[in-house]
Amino acid sequence: MRYKVVVTKVEVAELWVRATDEEAAAQKVKDELITPWSYAGRWDTKATEVQVVDAQPESGGSNPNQTSTSGPMLLKLKDAAMELGISYGTLHALMKDGGIEYTKVGSGKYISRASLAAFIESNTQR
């Protein structure tokens, strides 16, 4: 199944801002927050709400051990771990021990969808 999830997260940051008055201080912070590289100090999460708003059956086969064939051929390690349902650390240990094949591009390491499928097939107990 695929689930559409809406996440609402409330975060709070306290800042000291140099300005001529309160309105100018508020505007200065608003202007800073709309920039993609803004830094507004340390943020504390005050509340998080997760709500499932829709569910759809997965298209394709009914094999729960089959990885998705759509998307990029090479996955970042974080995404490959998520596909397998294991932690990043476990995936890294498997790579180090030779339990799963990976591809090196420059200094980055990636795992192909074919390697994920081969890993699942070779480790499936019948």
Image: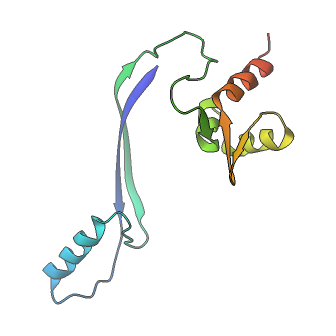
Q: Which colour style is shown? A: rainbow
Above or below: residue 93 compared with residue 84: below
Residue 113: which quarter of the image?
top right
Give the residue furthest to the right: 97
In this picture, residue 121 sits left or right of residue 38: right
Residue 119: which quarter of the image?
top right
The quarter of the rendered structure image containing the C terminus is: top right
Residue 7: which quarter of the image?
top left
Residue 22 position in % (x across, y down): 16, 82
Residue 40 position in % (x across, y down): 37, 72
Above or below: residue 75 compared with residue 119: below
Above or below: residue 16 compared with residue 94: below
Residue at 60% x, 12% y is 63
Residue 31 position in % (x across, y down): 23, 71
In this picture, residue 30 sits left or right of residue 118: left
In this picture, residue 74 sits left or right of residue 1: right
In this picture, residue 98 sits left or right of residue 11: right
Residue 97 position in % (x across, y down): 86, 40
Above or below: residue 64 compared with residue 39: above
Q: How many labels does the image show?
A: 0
Residue at 23% x, 69% y is 30
